[in-house]
Amino acid sequence: MTALTSCASAPVERAQPLLHPSLDDAFAQGFQTVVGRAPFSVRLWLDGAQGWSALWDLGDGTAGASGTGPQTARFARPGVYRPSVTLSVAGSPSVTLSQRIVVLGDEPVTPSVGRYGVNEDLAADPPQQVASQLALMRAAGVEWLRLPLRWFWLEPQRGRYRWDYVDGVVEQAGDAGLQLLAVLGGTPRWSSGIDAGTRRSGVRSDAFEPTDARDFAAYVYRVVDRFKGRIGTYELMNEPNSPDHWAPKPNAARFVEMLCAGYFAAKYADPQSAVVLGGLNGNGLSLGYETPEARDFLKTIYLGAAERCFDVLAIHPYAHPTEDGGRTLQSWIDATRQYMEERGDRRPIWLTEVGWSTGASLWGHSAISEEQQAEWVHVVYDRITGPQKVFWYNFKENRPDPTDPEYQWGLVRYDLRLKPAYRAFADLKR
């Protein structure tokens, strides 16, 4: 005789619904789905919620709504909000889903501490020099370090990040007491689609524009999120109005797309981060030597949405020290400031690159001595008015090649021996 047994039905395990917009949506559609400027409205919706009951807390001060249909949260003031929904269904425990929403105000984030900065590509320098360089910077009174965190280093393959290239120098610079301005750019080939064998001579493969702004935004978000609390200021791209840095030729409309995509990604990762508009070659207007695509680049930026996609404007005005350099440099800066003020814009201007090489004749100009370079340090930092922060290019000479003027910009030599310009920099705060 066969024994009969009865079994209680096991609870049906249901897949958890998904709340949108999510971080994945931001990566796929752009970060303006989850971050915007007050007043800001966000449409929230659920996937896979059939059969569930829902009670919403939209986080905007309105009474909780019910039902699994789409909801709209409206945020009148800047802040970080977490609208949520609590879901319940028979036979399963209730679950609460939430999504972080960032609402920005009109005031820019502008770091105010410190004025004296330098450029140095520490992650590309010989590792045995880094600690000595940082000690020399601090001894000279350097307060800010402009540090590239290149995209092709950090994401050599789409979606696969490696941080070992930069983690160490970021930590060392922070331990040395330096404020960091991280430069984000350097397009990997998987994003630009460029074939290394077809680019013109002298143009780096990482100078080509990304094919998709979402790729750039994802990289910006990952970097800002990782270094939140250690780096608070980011410069998006470098000299986008130069064919040497935006290939095959400058494209203001594409730069605006990248700038805004990166701006909202950075603000979502860290709402208190400051976004610096990638240092424009010259003063962003017309100095007479620009290509047609680069001329009046800043004016194109101000025509559209990009006017609100940065906290600080950066320019790279390389005036020649002994060719009426002080007056020329001041006039270039004043022209940029005047253009901004005519549009009611009082955001800060930073010089994130300025200086001159002690090498042979550069760009058709006469060579200068090391003593003249030292005097130029005093002029740039003591006599020029307007910029809130000034970053000398470069702290260290790039290579031990005295015949190439591109490698002789430093305050110190490649082997870290001091040049007169280093002592002039150190005298600035005394």
Image (cartoon, rainbow, N blue to C red):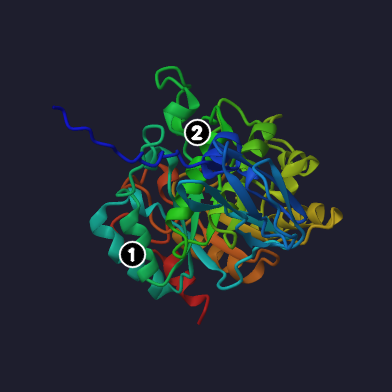
Which corner quadrant of the image does residue 311 belong to? Answer: bottom right
Residue furthest out toward the bottom: 430
Q: Which mark is residue 172?
A: 1
Element type where label 1 sits in the image: helix
- Quadrant location, the N terminus: top left
Give the answer, above or below, for where 196 lies relative to 62: above
Q: Is residue 184 visible?
A: no
Q: Nearer the viewer, residue 218 or 417?
A: 218
As drawn, is 342 to the left or to the right of 202?
right
Q: Is residue 81 visible?
A: yes
Element type where label 2 sits in the image: helix
Alpha-carbon span between mark 1 and mark 2: 28 Å
Q: Which mark is residue 207?
A: 2
> x, y percentage for residue 261?
61, 41
Give the answer, above or below, for where 10 lies relative to 411: above
> x, y percentage for residue 404?
40, 42
Question: What amino acid type is highlighted by mark number 1?
Answer: Gln
